Amino acid sequence: MLQPGRRDLQAIAGAPRADWVWPWPAPCDWWVRKQGWGLPPAARLPGAGGPGQSPGSFCGGDGRAEPGTPRGCLPCARCFCASCHQVLAPSPEARGRAATWSAGRCGLLWHLRDRQVRLGLFEIDPGHELHRLTCMMQAGLWAATQVSMDHPPTGLPTEEDFSEVLTQVHEGFELGTLAGPAFARLRRSLGLAEEDYQAALGPGGPYLQFLSTSKSKASFFLSHDQRFFLKTQRRREVRALLAHLPRYVQHLQRHPHSLLARLLGVHSLRVAGGKKVGEAEARGPGWWQLVAAARGRASVPPHSLPHPQKYFIVMQSVFYPAGRISERYDIKGCEVSRWVEPAPEGSHLLLVLKDLNFQGKTINLGPQRTWLLRQMELDTAFLQELNVLDYSLLVAFQHLHEDKRDRGRSLIFCTARSMQGVQSPQELETQNRRLLPDASNALHTLDGPEQRYFLGLVDLATVYGLRKRLEHLWKTLRYPGRTFSTVSPAHYARRLCQWVEAHTE
């Protein structure tokens, strides 16, 4: 029997009532050889370990490979019946996209270029303590995105888009997708194709990890192409995100060039049998209770709530593309605990430095400085309305090539891209739009005379509640005369805007 508040996958697909299980997708042959791992027992069919079938083939319900399954293709989201292992094959178009995507990325030149831009990052390989967790995330996100591709939201947005919960049962774990239609609409508004989103976050390559300088116990990952950033979250942070999600979407609609990081998905992960995955496991109610609490509705009985769970978000990486980025900073506008020991000279470690490391540096934007100061005011005022603090302004430096300094050749394209959706000059001024550069991450990219800068506001889920008020009182006594991060939202917003004004020209 389906639990209240859950939107079951077989109900969406119109499949018969059965114990459907989403398996671990079959990786490319080259990836299996490289990593030394294959399908888990429930999804490993006779041909995967026996004669007559290739590692990339699937059972057709009778123990034989499904005809036409391309050898070594990327996973096509398939649904297996636990009782008979029958396969619901993807559409030919989906299979063709996956095979094409795989073939295009396996060349020697791509591997050499990929190795170069990954300097300082660590692949989460089978020997890594978080490898099992990331494999589950990859398989779950692939299947979750397939649902939004097969059933895209239509019509006008509704309140249900923000409260819908989809729980998909996989081999050994469950992945919950919160507000899937709302995030699908947001990704579409950003021009992000679901196929690209699925390919980047799915099992086509390992997630990457970097040496984090954050004090939180969260785990941080990058997709293999470094385009998307994944972060585990506490339950209270998730609850705040759910409550603020409709207003967050409205703010991005009013200010399309906002500096706020683009949140692309929120998910839960629960392992079968109550086993933990990774560190800092979040124990607590399921997604449906969090949604109910955020939306002011009654929740389901506690006995139907799964635990333990891990929560994580997916967002667009501010530091993308990462090639040629020379310095990275996390700015909060204060001084207590805001120094990071730099990496040794010649080291390839990618460290995100902090406020005190930024001393003596300036962001030289030229004419775009006026836009930045105004957008900082708009975004921090919005976060103040949400009673949020402790967010960060991410800043990165990248030296501009000579061809990028000549803006004239791409002016027409940049203007058309920046003015898309504008109805009148008054609307243009209200939305505080700017001339977007011809870059793959234009919303977080600003070009100065000599440098390209990546800027974005992240960590938007800390509410100034009782816990933070008590922390503010303690730090006031502990650090007299010094600035620290835990202050009122109004003070925090004003101080960060002042920092930007003082460090730009």
Image (cartoon, rainbow, N blue to C red):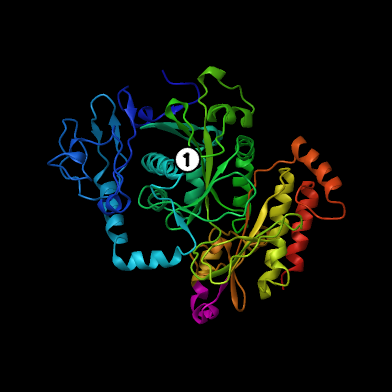
Amino acid type, label 1 = Gly
The tally of labels here is: 1
Question: Which residue occupies the foreground of this view, 403 or 478?
Answer: 478
Q: Circle 1 sits in a helix, a strand or a loop, which is it?
A: loop
Q: Which of the 4 quarters of the picture holds residue 467?
A: top right
Residue 323 vs 377, above or below: the answer is below
Q: Looking at the picture, how far across and down is residue 148, in whole percent?
A: 41, 41
Viewer can see residue 443: yes
Residue 78 vs 415, above or below: the answer is above
Q: Which residue is painted at 43% across and 42% down in the image?
A: 137
Q: Give the range drawn in magenta.
A: 398-412
Q: Looking at the picture, how far across and down is residue 333, in whole percent?
A: 74, 58
Residue 44 belongs to the span the image colors magenta: no
Q: Which of the 4 quarters of the picture holds residue 63?
A: top left
Q: Quadrant of the C terminus?
A: bottom right
Q: How crowded is mark 1: few (under 14 residues within 10 Å), some or many (20 or more)?
A: few
Q: Looking at the picture, how far across and down is residue 274, in whole percent?
A: 47, 27
Q: Which residue is painted at 47% across and 40% down in the image?
A: 155
Q: Which of the 4 quarters of the picture holds residue 435?
A: bottom right
| Dominant secondary-structure state across the stretch colored magenta | helix
Q: Which residue position is annotated with label 1?
A: 155
Q: Which residue is painted at 76% across and 55% down in the image?
A: 336
Q: 181 left or right of 21?
A: right
Residue 59 vs 442, above or below: the answer is above
Q: Which residue is painted at 73% across and 54% down in the image?
A: 337
